[in-house]
Image (cartoon, rainbow, N blue to C red):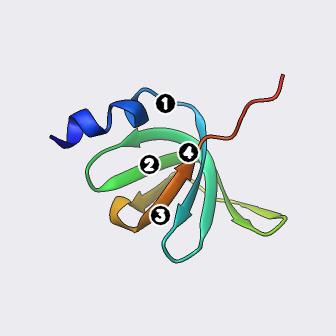
Amino acid sequence: MRRDRDRLVRQSLRERFVVTMTSGETFDGLLFEVDDKTVHLVDAHALDGATRVVVDGALFLPRDRVAYMQRPEVKA
């Protein structure tokens, strides 16, 4: 069941993630929601090398095109 496999991701809602797409595009944002088809980020930025471009509004990424997600370590 997919919901069981998503347990770890769902426990991380409202945490910041860097999401890399299969196309190589990369986005940074707060994981707001996730389901079988979509990853929903808010307070998001498109990343291009050292450049961060603010995404105006919420960002909905097709889950089948997500290569991987990384939760950056929070430095105190």
Check whether the beta carbons of the residues at disc 4 and disc 2 lie within 8 A of each other.
Answer: yes
Q: Nearer the viewer, residue 34 or 5?
A: 5
Which type of secondary structure does the marked residue at label 3 adopt? Answer: strand
Marks 3/4: CA distance? 19 Å
Q: Which residue is mark 3?
A: 67
Picture quarter with the C terminus? top right
Q: Nearer the viewer, residue 44 or 65?
A: 65
Marks 4/1: CA distance? 14 Å
Q: Nearer the viewer, residue 14 or 68?
A: 68
Mark sitting earlier along the chain (3/1): 1
Check whether the beta carbons of the residues at disc 4 and disc 1 lie within 8 A of each other.
Answer: no
Q: Please, is residue 28 above or below residue 50 in the view?
A: above
Check whether the beta carbons of the residues at disc 3 and disc 4 lie within 8 A of each other.
Answer: no
- Is 67 positioned to the left or the right of 19 in the image? left
Residue flagged by tag 2: what amino acid is it?
His
Residue at coordinates 32% horizontally, 38% vertically from top-left?
6
Which type of secondary structure does the marked residue at label 4 adopt? Answer: strand
Q: Nearer the viewer, residue 55 or 10?
A: 10
Q: Nearer the viewer, mark 3 or mark 4?
A: 3
Which type of secondary structure does the marked residue at label 1 adopt? Answer: loop
Residue flagged by tag 3: what amino acid is it?
Ala
Expressed as whole percent of the image width and height from the top left, the position of residue 68 reads: 50, 57
* Residue 76 disc label: none
* Residue 42 disc label: 4
